[in-house]
Amino acid sequence: MAQGDAGEDRRHQVMAWLHRRAENIAAGLLAVMFLAFIVQIVFRYLFNFPIGWTSELTVVCWLWLVLFGSAFVLGERDEIRFDLLYGAVGRRARIAMAIVFSLALIVLYGASLKASYAYVTFMKVERSSYLHIRMDWLFSIYILFLGAVIARYVWLLLRLLRGKDPEAPDVTQVSSGL
Amino acid sequence: MSPFALAVLAIVALSLLGLPIGHAMIAGSLLYFWVRGVDMGTAAEQLLNGMNTSYLLLAIPLFILAAEFMNSGSIMDRLLRFCNAIVGRYRGGLAQVNVVQSIIFASMSGSALADAAGSGKLMQSLMTRDGKYTPSFAAALTAVSSVIGPIIPPSIPLVIYALVSDTSIGFLFLGGVIPGLLIGAVQMGLIAVTAKRRNFPVEAAVPLARLPRITWEAFPALMMPVILLGLLYSGITTPTEAAAAAAAYALLVSALLYRSISVRDVYRSLVTSSRVTISIGMLIAGALVFNYVITVENIPKTLSAALQTYQLSPFMFLLAVNILLLILGCFLEGTTILLVIVPVLLPTAHALGIDPVHFGVVVVVNIMIGLVTPPYGLLLFMMVKIAEVPLKDLVREVLPFLWVMIGALALMTFIPEIVLFLPKLLGYKG
């Protein structure tokens, strides 16, 4: 038993460490986006030399930030969800609800994996206009996103089936930008 | 059941069950593609291309970052001292300070939640010290005054509206100025009336001799809206670049001038901002996929045609939209309403000859009011946590403000000039 706890502890530590690294990456992407804009403004107005690659870089950072972050940085508690019901019901009902939505997500996202992969790899024929990066590379984050989200919900489902409570959502943690 | 009805049902059911709304929209759309026999890779295509071409959306993370930089530096303290020097001397002075501070902060930040998070704690301790105001009144006031944030430019919801409606962000921002001031004015009016009745305290008047110094200390912060709007309307930068410049300015002022922000603070601001960005971004991503389904099904045009058979007047339509959104705002998160409900209403508004800038500002004011309407109001939840007051007491104190704000909303709904006066002054053709 004690050994199991130790194993659980170590797993928590590893997950927490990985999560902090994921946060580093997200913060880094945002920082790059911010700096690229500043560079763009400085070059256009101070040096009178408009550059195009910065706007491409910022858009790529934005796409990657959202998809990477949604897969690896956001916790269950940060997500924007409709929690009037989910937050109010008892533990057993919440477990049942979470089992239903996890299953639905796994089935639907899973069913789209093949076609999504086909779309992303098909995009190898195009390159981005300034940086000339192959579009299948830029878009590959979507496959990573799908895979990670499916894996996460499979993990959540397994926990739920063992009767572990999904965390009750904390509405004050919701990060809406409004 | 038609595939579209099935998709809507799936999205509603999955959201009700508690799946994050962005994922629910993607999942429902995938179900639609599956049942219709459409390539399921369409979701990937819509999401990736939509995110990759919506340059305007990049303003959102940058406005969030700017607000975070301001909140982690001492800009807020200086602003409060400045506001207190000006309106603290009147009855209910600190309550008025709360509103004035929100108006000024609104012209630097595009987010109501950022305003409440930034000033909430400080305002709460100032207002409740020595039992001057009840904790629930102070918390209610911070919640309702924060609503002004995204109405006065810059504004994150107006950026989202510009995206879904293809309206000029510059004119939308201008359109928000007078309505934002109007909301502030009705709040201050209500405070003045309540202050007499409830005998609110007066703050010791700050001697006029100290005013220049206090103003000087707050000056770099007060310059921020001037710089931001200057960049925007002189055409020097695009709106997105102006957002980046605002963030850079906030960072420079905090770091170099006020020396109140450390490298650690900067990193923390980046992490917090990226979290907020990710959750809105996910919602936008889901809406991009689902809006494709809505477009394929021709829903907005169908609705517009159906409504036209009723011969609705623009007046009746706007009234109906306001009531609908106020009700939805009690239950739904505002970004979702903007991204999913508003695009469906836009063609009808257009067919009825309603000005898109007017419509956008009215819709955003409405959605902002939704942030303080129970049972689901994000600003209420935030203040419950910051001020540690029961939701019930908070709601009781919010209600009078809610009524005057709805009054102001009605006014700007039916007198379009309140919104359109400034944009027209600066060349908006309507």
Image (tube, rainbow, N blue to C red):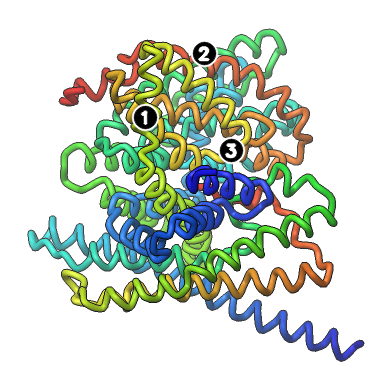
Q: Is residue B96 left or right of residue A59?
A: right
**x%, y% of residue B389?**
76, 36
**x%, y% of residue B276?**
51, 55
Q: Are marks 1 and 2 in contact (CB under 8 Å)?
A: no
The kind of residue on which mark 1 rests is Gly
- In the rendered structure, find residue B407 and report the number of the disc placed on it: 2
Identify the residue position indicated by label 3 in the image. B332
Name the residue rendered at 80%, 47% in the picture.
Answer: A89
- In the image shown, does B334 or B298 lie closer to the viewer? B298
Query: Which numbered disc, 3 or 2, marks the residue that appears first in the sequence?
Result: 3
How dense is the environment of label 1, judged by Cα within 10 Å: few (below 14), some, or many (20 and up)?
many
Name the residue rendered at 53%, 24% in the picture.
Answer: B324
Q: Are marks 3 and 2 in contact (CB under 8 Å)?
A: no
Marks 1 and 2 on same chain: yes
Secondary structure state at the residue bearing disc 1: helix
Secondary structure state at the residue bearing disc 3: loop
- In the image shown, does B277 or B388 lie closer to the viewer? B277
How dense is the environment of label 2, judged by Cα within 10 Å: few (below 14), some, or many (20 and up)?
some
Identify the residue position indicated by label 1 in the image. B360
Question: Is residue A155 depicted above or below B67 in this figure?
Answer: below
